[in-house]
Image (cartoon, rainbow, N blue to C red):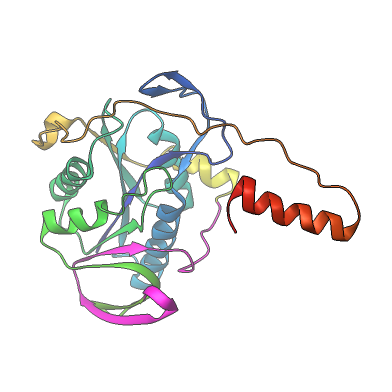
Amino acid sequence: MKIYVCTKSVADTAATIKLVDDTHIQEDIKFIMNPYDELALEEALQLKEKAGEEAEVILVSYGNNSIGEVLLQGLAMGADRSIRINTTNLFNDHITIAAVLAAAIKKDGEPSIIFTGQHTIDVEGMQTAYRIAAELDLPIVSNIMKFEYNGDKVTVNREIEGGDKEVYEVSLPCVIAANRGLNEPRYPKLPARMQAKKKPVTVYEIADLGVDESSAVSLTKFILPPDKPPAKIIGGSPAEAARELVRVLKEEVRVL
């Protein structure tokens, strides 16, 4: 059983983003595995534990030097090996990204199941998982909150609008997009990270995959969010403060 997990390197949400120019950010900030991909990887590792020794978890990532640390983290968590696809274009559209990831998976072997995150915390396009499934002509279920493996099929619960849940039974192979609440990802200790450095990493260039990397979307400009205004302290008696607060909300903030 080959279990593939597609992962992406994203800037740490605690990092301070600075622009080098209109289309580049400083790359000396900390990059992490996309949190939704961590959920996908954890579920893949739990599936491997249930399936036994015949199962293999393979990470697949597409990006620049920052994906090295992400792959190392995934290998330390328990993945068996990884596939790294190099690129200098960090802002390809979802069509291209999915085509590249799907091509790397096809070149490596026949997938039993492909896990992805529901979306990424940087772009939040929510398209890649669907497009990978389309590229490989596989069924997909997204927004997964519960996952059960039953041999040649899986049963999944997904959350829909209003907090309701849907239950699907899906035959393998398939694509599963993980959402929060599915599990609690494990965190590797130092010995596991040291062992991860010895695990196999297959490196592909775009030319190895026969995919056209030209993108239908081009990045024209980054714009940082404006600085937040300083906090406003409202004084006076409780009644005076309440009246002033209502006035500020109505006339200045305009939320009432």
The quadrant where residue 175 appears: bottom left
Image x and y of residue 51, in percent: 33, 71
Closer-to-camera residue (40/76): 40
- Residue 169 falls within the magenta-colored stretch: yes
Does residue 143 appear left or right of residue 197 in this picture?
A: left
Does residue 114 appear left or right of residue 143 in this picture?
A: left
Image x and y of residue 186, in percent: 53, 58
Instruction: Answer above or below: position of 86 versus 131.
Output: above
The quadrant where residue 239 appears: bottom right
Image x and y of residue 40, in percent: 39, 59
Whether residue 175 is visible to the viewer of this picture, yes or no, is: yes
Instruction: Answer above or below: position of 71 versus 44.
Output: above
Residue beneath the point at 59% across and 39% down: 14
Instruction: Answer above or below: position of 25 versus 105.
Output: above
Residue beneath the point at 22% across and 76% down: 170
Q: Which residues are magenta?
A: 159-187
Image x and y of residue 195, in percent: 48, 43
Residue beneath the point at 48% across and 47% down: 76
- Residue 134 falls within the magenta-colored stretch: no
Closer-to-camera residue (105/249): 249
Does residue 231 appear left or right of residue 155 in this picture?
A: right
Instruction: Answer above or below: position of 18 versus 204.
Output: above
- Tell me how many marks there are: 0
The quadrant where residue 129 appears: bottom left
Quadrant in which the N terminus appears: bottom left
